[in-house]
Amino acid sequence: MTNVVITGTGLFAPDHIIDNDALVASFNAWVDAENVRRAEAGIEERLTHSSSEFIVKASGIHSRHVLDAEGILDPERMRPRLRERSNDEPSLQCEMGAIAARQALEHAGVAAETIDLVIVGCSNLERPYPAIAVELQALLGAGGYAFDMNVACSSATFAIETAANAIRAGSATRALVVNPEICSAHLNFRDRDSHFIFGDACTAIVLERDDLATVDARFEILGTRLVTRFSNAIRNNAGFLNRVTDSDPQALDKLFVQEGRRVFKEVCPLVAALINDHLASLDHTGDDLSRMWLHQANRHMNDLIARRVLGRDPSEQEAPVILDRFANTSSAGSIIAFHLHRDGLAPGALGVICSFGAGYSAGSVVVRRV
């Protein structure tokens, strides 16, 4: 069996940062104006203010990176303002992907032309075709083949398994997995329960055959395991059929919607069982883990999942948290955690990269520091 290793990671985070106080000020200004409008229209129901304390208590999030702060914080707009690009320019997700990918390639000591598989996986692709991955492949000068995939917040782990299997099967020798998440574009910033959840970011990972790797600090992929279970608890109904069904393109269901309490109740045991079963299949237990790079959606979810795997409260080193300053970046979240907290592990140390989200979908990648 061919051993596959992760040798490089990269991260693009936009320069614009919105803290909770600024986000709340914008939201509350809109609430005040909306409540006046409702009063004038004779609507009795009033909207409630948000607060920084509420956001931190609900999620653990303090700030987020976004591609455009001005449009989001404008109470008259409350969505990012992004420039439409011509067909002759790199798309926004391709541009984000190139920045993260070049970091990862440099980290791995790998030239782009030696990559023969590029997978772009994310929750929302900016167009159906041509594939962002093929565009990125051309921009970087990579070879082989490329394709897009979407498994919502689990797109990164699902792509890692796909890339690792391609390398093991011999159809690729080196692969690049890229996760360009523009989450601010599908978030309803006028919904008190979710206006704070997401941020924007892009991650990249280089995978290669172990015998080709040149860097010392690399992580062998011991195994991958994926699971899906259909649920409507997290949903986005935006799609190309909207125009032919004559649905309202501005309807709330065309943005991110979720039943938060239901998600917490149903996803946490699913993910903990996935990790525990996966470890058991590799003759390991939670006691063997030195680090858990979990999907960064909600601090309470991560703490509960880690407790169910470790059998105790995790330390900050064992289950690093990055959502406090990045918020939920969908599929990029667990990879940001891995990128920023992969150093310092001794050779032989065991870790797990885990994602979970809409679908439901969940992925577990068990790695060992070489």
Image (cartoon, helix red, strand yellow):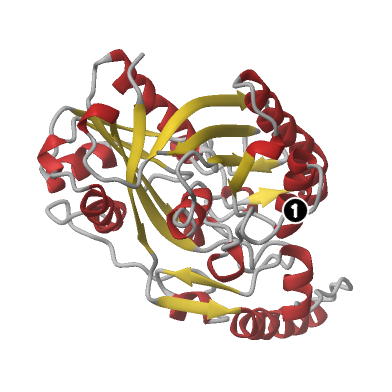
Task: Pick whichever, 172 or 310, lies toward us.
Answer: 310
**Displayed quadrant of residue 52:** bottom right
Q: Secondary structure at mark 1?
A: helix
Give coordinates of residue 149: x percent, y percent: 40, 33
Give coordinates of residue 268: x percent, y percent: 76, 40
**Residue 72 falls left or right of residue 235:** left
**Residue 236 falls left or right of residue 7:** right
Q: Which kind of residue does numbered mark 1 sit on?
A: Asp
- The residue at the point 49 percent across, 58 percent down is 341
**Residue 297 falls left or right of residue 168:** right
- The residue at the point 41 percent across, 73 percent down is 68
Q: Which residue is mark 1?
A: 303
Give coordinates of residue 117: x percent, y percent: 24, 30
Where, quadrant-wise, is the N terminus in this rendering? top left
Where, quadrant-wise, is the C terminus in this rendering? top left
Residue furthest right in the image: 44
Decide: few, some or many residues near mark 1? Use Cα within 10 Å; few <14, some 14-19, many ≥20. some
Give coordinates of residue 321: x percent, y percent: 61, 61
